[in-house]
Amino acid sequence: MADIIKKLPVLPSERALKVISGRWKAIILYHLFDRPKRLSELRRLIPAVSQKVLIQQLREMEEHGLVRREIFREIPPRVEYSATTLGLSLEPVLLALCEWGQRHAAELNEADRVTDCVIRPRKGDNRPMP
């Protein structure tokens, strides 16, 4: 972990962007917000990403403390990925980015080309939907 920390920028906003940058990281986290998922389930939810890139992005997020990889010692072995507390703390940030993306699309008269910002509640979470 120390090598990763050395490579990260010292400016906090630049550091944050470096940790969450990557074409698929925000999408992967979005799908992990509600519950843990297996690799095959993430592949179904994000069909445009190759398995190689998905695994690479998951490993990077695991190194940065955003995702936890849990191996279940059973036959056949099962691996699940879940968002850590640090990863879950990005939920309002990603929601704000989504809302900004909607405003941007509206400014460019492309609001009909974007979807709603939906963050699904986690199991046991009684927060009202935004």
Image (cartoon, helix red, strand yellow):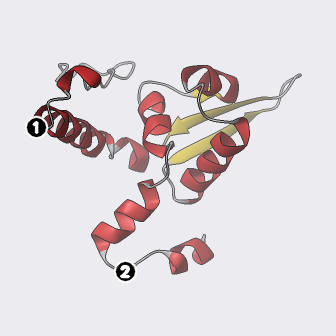
In percent of the image, x 24 and y 19: which residue is there? 126
Residue corresponding to mark 2:
10
Image quadrant of residue 52?
A: top right
In percent of the image, x 59 and y 59: which residue is there? 63
Categorize mark 1 by other alpha carbons within 10 Å: few (<14), some (14-19), many (20+): few
Q: Can you say whether 118 is above or below 89 in the image? A: above
Image coordinates of residue 8 in percent, x first then y, are: 47, 74
| Residue 81 circle label | none
Q: Is residue 102 left or right of residue 28?
A: left
Image coordinates of residue 111 in percent, x first then y, are: 18, 25
Q: Is residue 37 left or right of residue 17?
A: right
Q: Secondary structure at mark 2?
A: loop
Q: Secondary structure at mark 1?
A: helix
The residues tagged by marks 1 and 2 sit, at their Cα atoms, a distance apart of 34 Å
Categorize mark 2 by other alpha carbons within 10 Å: few (<14), some (14-19), many (20+): few
| Residue 107 circle label | 1
In percent of the image, x 54 and y 35: which residue is there? 82
Image quadrant of residue 20?
A: bottom left
Looking at marks 1 and 2 on the same chain, the residue that comes earlier in the sequence is marked by 2
The amino acid on which the numbered mark 2 sits, given as a three-letter code, is Val
Which quarter of the rendering shows the C terminus? top left
Image coordinates of residue 2 in percent, x first then y, are: 59, 76
Q: Can you say whether 4 is above or below 40 in the image? A: below
Image quadrant of residue 47?
A: top right
The amino acid on which the numbered mark 1 sits, given as a three-letter code, is Glu
Q: Residue furthest left?
A: 107
Which quarter of the rendering shows the N terminus? bottom right
